[in-house]
Image (cartoon, rainbow, N blue to C red):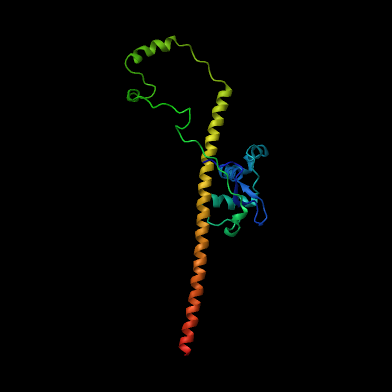
Amino acid sequence: VQYPAFTLLPLREGEDSDAPLLSLASVWLLVTLRDRYEADATDALLERHSAMRISAEQRSGLLDFLLGRCKVCALLVPTQALTSVPPPSPTRLPRPGSGRGSRSPIAPTLLRNLPGTPSGKAAAAAPKAAAAAPTPERKGPSARAARRQLAEEAEDKALAAELVDHLKASAKAQVSLCRLEAEGAALAGLVKELEVQLQATDRE
């Protein structure tokens, strides 16, 4: 699945309970730029990704939390308030090989040679074909820009997936911690009750 950049996360812009929630794109830019956030997170870049600027006083603690350097973050929405976070709407990506545009399987004979290495008659005819073939035109700036854009999109998707996995793991750890605290409180109460009963037995 793929999560939209505007997906709201269980992280707030400030420590106040009514502070706006941070989007996936906002947090992704912080993780990507890190120490270069102040200089490179321009208004144009934020507007391009529909992201909000994270204040300077919150960047260090939030980045440490996202990178796993600490287990607690003041911006994290508490477990009892997770219902205030809108559920995400991921988009399911098509499986490779599905749909009308799927490629037919490669013949076993073609797999005997390395890609780009001709064999047999094709190897002998390759120099002649290369000599007769016209010199291809150089790709202009538009082609380089397209490749750069595709590379940026692929990097964006990979970082977004890594960030979502990290947030899921952090949320699970937070839930487990709350559960352990509740169990510890219950055990402490049970110990107190047993002590009271023992004291009553001793008096009798």
Above or below, 85 relative to 195: above
Q: Quadrant of residue 96?
A: top left
Above or below, 81 relative to 96: below
- Residue 106 pos. (x, y %): 38, 26
Q: Quadrant of residue 41?
A: top right
> How many badges with numbers are in the image?
0
Residue that extends furthest to the bottom in the rendered view of this protein: 204
Question: Between residues 111 and 144, which one lies in front from this camera angle?
Answer: 111
Question: Between residues 62 and 120, which one lies in front from this camera angle?
Answer: 120
Q: Going by the image, does 16 lie left or right of 147?
A: right
Q: Image point 41% across, 26% down: which residue?
A: 104
Q: Image point 61% across, 50% down: which residue?
A: 86
Residue 136 in view here: yes
Residue that extends furthest to the front in the rendered view of this protein: 100
Q: Going by the image, does 109 lie left or right of 163?
A: left
- Residue 36 pos. (x, y %): 59, 42
Residue 67 in view here: no
Question: Between residues 197 and 104, which one lies in front from this camera angle?
Answer: 104
Above or below, 69 relative to 152: below
- Residue 197 pos. (x, y %): 48, 82
Q: Image point 59% across, 60% down: which residue?
A: 80
Above or below, 42 relative to 99: below
- Residue 5 pos. (x, y %): 59, 41
